[in-house]
Amino acid sequence: MDLAKPVPGRKHSVETALRIALLKRQGMTAKGIAEQLKREGEAISIEGVESYSKRRRKPSIQEGLRVRLKKGG
């Protein structure tokens, strides 16, 4: 029985991506978001924030935001 090879690289947290997207919608910069997340106990660099904001992730993040905003969460 062959097992599937894992995809290399770090797995992104959907919750962190949603939090970053919400902060970006409030007009915060990548530096401001990184500082806010650090205050909340999540260590992430400015480059990490920018990585979460990449174009290829936006459709899924935007859909997640719509669902959350509809639920009121």
Image: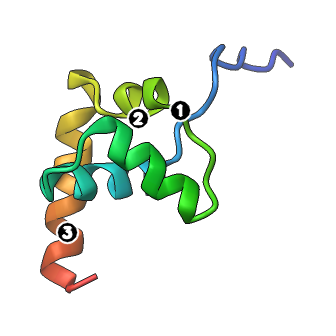
**Disc 2/disc 3 C-alpha distance (Å):** 22 Å
The percent coordinates of residue 64 (x first, y second) are: 25, 58
The percent coordinates of residue 39 (x first, y second) are: 55, 62
* Residue highlighted by disc 3: 67
Position of the C terminus by quadrant: bottom left
* Residue type at tag 2: Val
* Residue type at tag 3: Val
- Contact, mark 1 vs mark 2 (Cβ under 8 Å): yes
Q: Residues within 10 Å of mark 2 (few under 14, many from 20)?
A: many
Location of residue 3 by image quarter:
top right
* Residue type at tag 1: Ser
- Residues 3 and 11: in front is 11
Q: Residues within 10 Å of mark 1 (few under 14, many from 20)?
A: some
Position of the N terminus by quadrant: top right
> Residue drawn 72% across and 14% down?
5
> Residue drawn 37% across and 38% down?
31
- Asked if residue 1 lies left or right of residue 31, the reply is right
Instruction: Give the secondary structure at mark 2.
Output: helix
> Residue drawn 26% across and 56% down?
23
* Residue highlighted by disc 1: 45
- Which sits earlier in the primary sequence, circle 1 or circle 3? 1
**Residue at the far bottom in the pictured view:** 72
- Residues 13 and 19: in front is 19
Image position of 46 with respect to 13: above or below: above
**Disc 1/disc 3 C-alpha distance (Å):** 27 Å
- Asked if residue 11 lies left or right of residue 24, the reply is right
- Contact, mark 2 vs mark 3 (Cβ under 8 Å): no
The percent coordinates of residue 47 (x first, y second) are: 45, 23
Location of residue 55 by image quarter:
top left
